[in-house]
Amino acid sequence: MRELQFREALREAMNEEMRKDETIFLIGEEVAEYNGAYKVSQGMLEEFGEKRIIDTPIAELGFTGIAVGAAMNGLRPIVEFMTFNFSLVAIDQVINSAAKMLSMSGGQFPMPMVFRGPTGNAGQLGAQHSQNFENWYANCPGLKVVVPADPYEAKGLLKSAIIDPDPVIFMESEVMYGDKGLVPEEEYYLPIGKARVVKEGSDVTIVTFGKMLSRVVIPAVEELTKEGINAEVIDLRTVRPIDYATVIASVKKTNRMVFVEEAWPLASISTEVSFKVQREAFDYLDAPIIRITSADVPLPYASTLIQEALPNAERVIKAVKEVLYLNK
């Protein structure tokens, strides 16, 4: 094992797969000459050349359409959005072409492609640059949606996404590119659609994914542990498909659930998982499920209001105590 930054783990995943398969290429804004907006593709132009590391104009709909056509013709594009906020400019190609082509062609056109880039809040960047769309994309049949929580997951899941026969939305938290974590020296893949039990526990199940794990849930669990509360923590890793079985098995053991995610509350991933848990494990629940999400407003610019709008460890601790009936 060695320590890598999140961006380095992503780069290794792409480099390893591109060395094995010449049909894989990377396309997006500033991915070549500038080495990527977040330096994920640093050095890749030198190794793979301008035919496989392709800079584009600021035209998401255009270069996403090019990638869709390339996938239909047997190539394996990796599309980098400078931020998933900008993927909305290209969402017609993602939803109406990439996600539907296999079905509409009667299986004649598989679409092996990855759409990747940063997601979520990263400080005072304005409401239109601070959004989470994993639930939007997860709503669409034909897509898989992956949200890694650390460098180990980033590499293993991206490698699996690149070789997957279906289009994969791969969302990387904008504030995590410099995060460090242990990554194996040897090659490995992590399965898409399988959650990870980060910490076993007996009192309450806390479900999350992406940067909420390290930034919010882990600090909360550390405080809860000091108070004698033994929380089980589940990292979904993938929000389409969702590993319901792992979540339900945990809830049947702990009898309580708190779900933490960064997105807005309506029609969120936590909404769907909560429904599934009450449908499949209702008789095991000893308290209503509590969801911790962002406030149902466009993210404010003022730093004080940002703190109020986003999930935090204090809200998680309060929610856990509420489902345990420890709050007066």
Image (cartoon, rainbow, N blue to C red):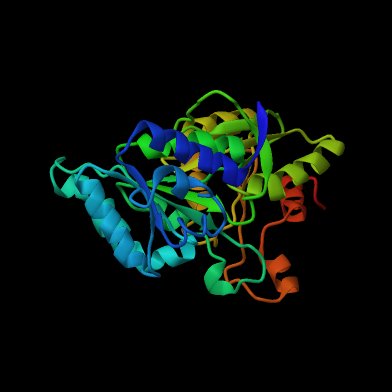
Report which quarter residue 221 is drawn in: top right
Residue in the foreground of this view, choosing between 103 and 110: 110
Can residue 52 be seen by looking at this rendering?
yes
- Residue 169 drawn at (x, y percent): 41, 49
Is residue 281 visible in the rendered structure shown here? no
Q: Nearer the viewer, residue 139 or 28?
A: 28
Residue in the picture at 54% in, 60% down: 37
Q: Is residue 172 left or right of residue 141?
A: right
Decide: is 272 above or below 250.
below
At 56% from the left and 53% from the top, the residue drawn is 39
Point out the residue furthest to the top here: 186
User: What number of labels is visible?
Assistant: 0
**Residue 305 at what x, y percent from top left?**
71, 73
Question: Which corner quadrant of the image does residue 3 belong to?
Answer: top right
Q: Quadrant of the N terminus?
A: top right
Q: 155 or 102, which lies in front?
A: 155
* Position of 19 relative to 27 (above/below): above
Residue 266 against residue 73 in the figure, above or below: below
Q: Is residue 112 left or right of residue 305?
A: left
Q: Residue at x 50, y 62 (%)?
A: 83
